[in-house]
Image (tube, coloured by chain):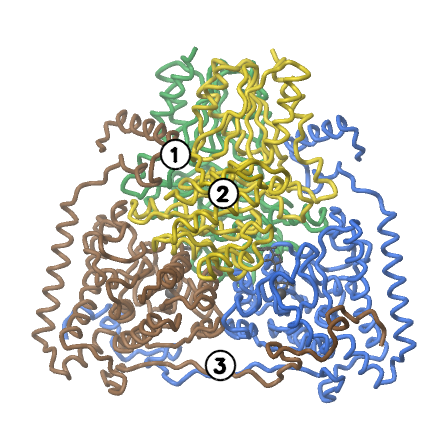
Chain colours: A blue, B brown, C yellow, D green
Amino acid sequence: MASHHQDKTKSSAGDEVIPPSTPSEMNTSPIDLGHIEVMQILNEHGEVDQGLEPSLSDERLLEVYRAMILARTFDQRMLTMQRQGRMGTFAPNTGQEACTVGQVVPLTKDDWYSPSYRSFGAQIMRGWPMEHLMRLWAGFHDGFPPPENVNDLPFSIVIGSHVLPAVGLGMGMNYKKKNDCVVVNFGDGASSQGAVSEALNFAAVYKAPVVFVCENNGWAISTPTAKQTANEVIAARGVAYGIPSIRVDGNDILAMVFAVDEAAKRARNGDGPTFIEAITYRMSLHTTADDPTVYRDEQEVLPWGKRCPITRFEIYLKNKNLLTNDSIQEITESCEQEVIAARDKFYSMPSANPGEIFDHLYEIMPEELSRQRDEYRKRLDDKGVDYE
Amino acid sequence: MASHHQDKTKSSAGDEVIPPSTPSEMNTSPIDLGHIEVMQILNEHGEVDQGLEPSLSDERLLEVYRAMILARTFDQRMLTMQRQGRMGTFAPNTGQEACTVGQVVPLTKDDWYSPSYRSFGAQIMRGWPMEHLMRLWAGFHDGFPPPENVNDLPFSIVIGSHVLPAVGLGMGMNYKKKNDCVVVNFGDGASSQGAVSEALNFAAVYKAPVVFVCENNGWAISTPTAKQTANEVIAARGVAYGIPSIRVDGNDILAMVFAVDEAAKRARNGDGPTFIEAITYRMSLHTTADDPTVYRDEQEVLPWGKRCPITRFEIYLKNKNLLTNDSIQEITESCEQEVIAARDKFYSMPSANPGEIFDHLYEIMPEELSRQRDEYRKRLDDKGVDYE
Amino acid sequence: MSKLTMVEALNLAMDQEMARDENVCMLGEDIGINGGVFRTTKDLQKKHGEDRVMDTPLAECGIVGAAIGMAIYGIRPVIEIQFSGFTMQAFDQIEQNMARLRNRTQGKYTLPMVLRTPYGGGIRAVEHHSESREAYWAHTPGLKVVIPSSPRNARALLAASIREDDPIVFYEPKAVYRAFREEVPDEPELMEIGKADIVRAGNDLTLISYGAMMRPCKEAVEDLAEDHNINVELIDLLTISPMDTETLTRSVQKTGRCVIVHEGHRTCGIASEIIARLNESAFEYLEAPIKRITGFDIPFPYFQVEEHFLPESEEIVNAIKETRNWQ
Amino acid sequence: MSKLTMVEALNLAMDQEMARDENVCMLGEDIGINGGVFRTTKDLQKKHGEDRVMDTPLAECGIVGAAIGMAIYGIRPVIEIQFSGFTMQAFDQIEQNMARLRNRTQGKYTLPMVLRTPYGGGIRAVEHHSESREAYWAHTPGLKVVIPSSPRNARALLAASIREDDPIVFYEPKAVYRAFREEVPDEPELMEIGKADIVRAGNDLTLISYGAMMRPCKEAVEDLAEDHNINVELIDLLTISPMDTETLTRSVQKTGRCVIVHEGHRTCGIASEIIARLNESAFEYLEAPIKRITGFDIPFPYFQVEEHFLPESEEIVNAIKETRNWQ
Ligand SMILES: Cc1ncc(C[n+]2csc(CCOP(=O)(O)OP(=O)(O)O)c2C)c(N)n1
Ligand SMILES: Cc1ncc(C[n+]2csc(CCOP(=O)(O)OP(=O)(O)O)c2C)c(N)n1
Ligand SMILES: [Mg+2]
Ligand SMILES: [Mg+2]
């Protein structure tokens, strides 16, 4: 054999030294990728898989139910306010309440939540006052900071851009040796962003305590999931990065709570991230600026009515004797009142202070910026605008 | 049931209308992700799996062999020139010749190839004169443009940034209804870049005729694959995006040729992309600026000597009576001569023309830029530098 | 001739260019059946087919990167990024490949592609939907940056951009999208890229602007002419890069005074560059400091207070008077 | 006191800050056992542990994004991007989150993080390894941009940056990394961020620069003093954003003439901004056009010809003489 390919490592140390870490021969057995479990506990007919029922107290079950009703009520009120011109563009969540609320039910105050713009149901449960969320959607700067004692990220307007920071929070928990976890929510559309793939990889490599909830609602504005990806099983992404992954019926509140709870426990236990693909459906508009009749056959929406997450949960709670038609009525009305009260509070809140837009960018305002603020204040003065 | 969750789609059109496209019930069967085949045709001992032998003529087999020897010879010459201070930083390919050469063997002139910086073996086979590649590595501007009649992208210095453009080429082939394909090469490190994930997704969604060759050589500078990803089966990424994926012994030239050929045929046939993870090993330095003894136990390198892609192919060719020790010697010497001739040509080529750095940015040079060029020329004049 | 909004005019340009050249194709999120979030590509997919007007996955880096490959392959992709704020997702492909591949291959590969994207404030949108970061692109060698200000020039500049062989960032002032109508000829019309437009000649002061800010500038100039007898020369840049320094210089050499207005941030913004160039080319003619009225160096504010962020004509009038009277 | 190279001085700053504050951690490609491709983080992992000095996957966007989350969680990540050309991969996270999250949350979350990255030409590297795009970051509200020029100020500025609560882009002039040694005190030393340094006082002309270009500027200034009796005031910016306009203004009000030198591209570069500001703050004092010597508006050339791309002292001398004599 000619000498040109006798590399130094081989000839200098001899052929015999073979450390165990590197196999000398290619392993040619096929690699089994396993399978992805699909979890449903409470089916479309209200039947329950008792082996998997999450252990929630009756009180907690009713709290969760109320949170879903509250989400739907808030949603409808926001649409009304938007039509009345009293609200900015808004992204409704109709039909996704189980998915959205369910993903935060297992969280503690010390855990963190990183919502998307369609996750207000979860934000309310996490402690965001509804009038605060109204401020947010109405374009006030003070609507975005999470309230005191709420460990949330502000939601991400740039699709997918919050997922890496959420993983960073998890890495921070590892760094500080805390046994908490992070739940981060994003859509089927967001799953196409490269930054989201990087987030999955970082979480897996660093065993960050992160629960990824990909809320696959079938659409990203006018783009159906079938055009978003050639493999509609988005959970396979998790597997590719070495993350335990599961598909869940996102319209089944029990399955959502169960899956997130399991994942959160694993995360807190040092076992790293979990990827949950929640199958649900965007029943309504993408946002109030959108007209889905342009691009989707509304026939497609119909069967999802049968899979309504709230109806199903009601059957379950009735079967458990936790709910009656009367108490449903009561809860519904109390939610309505709560939302109306929030709305009234929102309407009575101070108008925006145009003066503050320079105030929060830096810890200490640089001189050039304070000169610009003076210019701006002069503009406001000239226009006769009030500010602080 | 209370009316709050009676959404319009459900109530207006009634519950009965269920178009076939949307299942009314969740499919809860586990999703089988299948498995990834691992292909080896010519094993470490020179034994061949005859059922899979690619149908290459004897002449072609010898061409491929020679291309591998040429790659190794070029590699070693470049290292020498670099040590002599006659070459810039260089990234050797020692031990990866089967992988690198094999991935372009099945390509026609009309197909496109998108190399990485470690793919010179393939570039030579694609028609890049070696002195041209020497210009490239020696920091001449004229080294980067692919030669006439060679459908290659220039290689990518920014890791992973060429993969999306390569997919775009494939989309262009579909657009122009050509039955050609693109092979794009990148490393295990590159696979962590979000842009590479986006490329996989685009290729899958548009069924672009692209063959992804991820050359998993165990290292990205000092980072071993185990720290790069929690799932060392990088081929699983392809699966996640709905791309047929396979793992190949990258030190087995027959397997490389077979796998890329199959993938290229599928691509040309309109069946879309394929993901090939080629397992190989970076026997040498990352680049001449790198010192692997700082971060890796050179013991780890040893077993890979036994898996040398060239040795193995020699046994095969000898068994086929295509090669003898004498002809090996002959080929080796002729490659040496060819590389030396290229080197001499390179040394005799004109020195760089500092004048041209403004010339190729725009189709027509904007006025401000030509003013800057004048300034620059004045600088050269003042320094007494020659330019055209 | 028909009276069109800017959205309609852009649609017309794309429709006609697609009809003229089968290599012109489109990629973007929701641009197909949905016609884009602003309906700029309305009906183009229906007319020219799904193969030519492609809905993409939600990945801006992917869109730009794929278009680069298509452009190398001899196609002329016109891509839409839904809001200019999301071009950040594609910054790497824009800076590393779109702007440089021609140079890297010494002209072997050219990149005839247009990156269209709505920019700027004024439509009461949420964060990241009002950015004006044209300075990023002007600072990036290898790109051209075009910003129209009216339906007619939008149509003519977009058509010309599609025919150009160099990569172009085409910023569309979304505040102008439906703000007014203008006569636009039915037959294809082109405007040269790289030329500023002297919208109104004048001797007292040069006012330079572009895009959506041309409207308050025009108002200001009219006010000043009527009420104050100040004769302003108003220049619409139209192409931000490469900049038409000659036209600006000639004007300021004549007037000796200059005000620049844009909504993009101030530091290292377009106005800084204009000032630096005029400092070089018209220093001896300057009778007053050049005044810049720009977006502040803070993120574009949320919509409850955004109206006060953007310069209005009154402030421009005052700045012009001040600069006019400076001694 | 020991005589250190800039690489050693930076290493010292990080080592001491990590020892001082357990919340200081590091992320980057190959920064662990390999000590970074320039060995700036040499031995830090060995000293402070794998949990605190983390090798990352090859994904710059991932590094910045993850660090943002860690910073929100109360950690002080110091991240290394191997070359500033690869910050483009992270542009979205930098512009959309790193620069803005404080503002978005009205100060509820601060981002005490430092993005370290070697910038600039002069080491005969391949494409994308010599970029100077500090203007991108200066144009991005919410960031601070720091560029040291010598071992001692590199150490003091990096230590100060690590202690800052605002996010900082820390550009390291790689041409200076090992170019010379300087006495650096053993005890921690800090320099205030946001302040320019008057390296040499003078009355005839103000020369403004920063980073690697300070070396040819110093040479030029010495030449001029010795051979031509021209007394130049030399200012090292040190912090590019927020810029110390006061110091620049005072100097130019005194000298009336100014030359600015940097290697970053010209259009919308740092020099444009300085000119625009001096046009506002020192117009009446200017006796000559401000001259800028900058990188050209072309990609940084390949290394066979790169030596001619960067300004050298002779050209600076000539520019100063020209500006000095301009009337
Ligand atoms: C980076 C980026 N690109 C585009 C948009 C515009 N946009 C807003 S929502 C949306 C669709 C998101 O779809 P998905 O992630 O599935 O979430 P869903 O709306 O279904 O909840 C798009 C394209 C954006 N906000 N950010
Ligand atoms: C975006 C980017 N980040 C970092 C680098 C520096 N760098 C050059 S090569 C390399 C490792 C690449 O590893 P891999 O993709 O596995 O290819 P290999 O070197 O093993 O062939 C790195 C980090 C780069 N060139 N581009
Ligand atoms: Mg969706
Ligand atoms: Mg590798």
Residue at 72% in and 82% down: A44
- Quarter holding residue A294: bottom right
**Label 3 CB-ligand 2 distance < 8 A:** no
Asked if badge 2 and badge 1 are on a common chain, one would say no
Q: Numbered disc 1: what chain?
A: D
Looking at the rendered structure, the kind of residue marked 3 is: Leu
Could you tell me if the residues under marks 1 and 3 are in contact, i.e. CB atoms within 8 Å?
Answer: no
Could you tell me if the residues under marks 3 and 2 are in contact, i.e. CB atoms within 8 Å?
Answer: no
Q: Decide: few, some or many residues near mark 1? Use Cα within 10 Å; few <14, some 14-19, many ≥20.
A: many
Looking at the rendered structure, the kind of residue marked 2 is: Phe
The residue at which mark 3 appears reads as: A33
Residue A283, x across and y down, in percent: 69, 68
The residue at which mark 2 appears reads as: C170
The quadrant the C terminus of chain C occupies is top right
Looking at the rendered structure, the kind of residue marked 1 is: Phe
Residue at 81% in and 59% down: A77
- Quarter holding residue A3: bottom left
Q: Is residue D5 visible?
A: no
The residue at which mark 1 appears reads as: D296
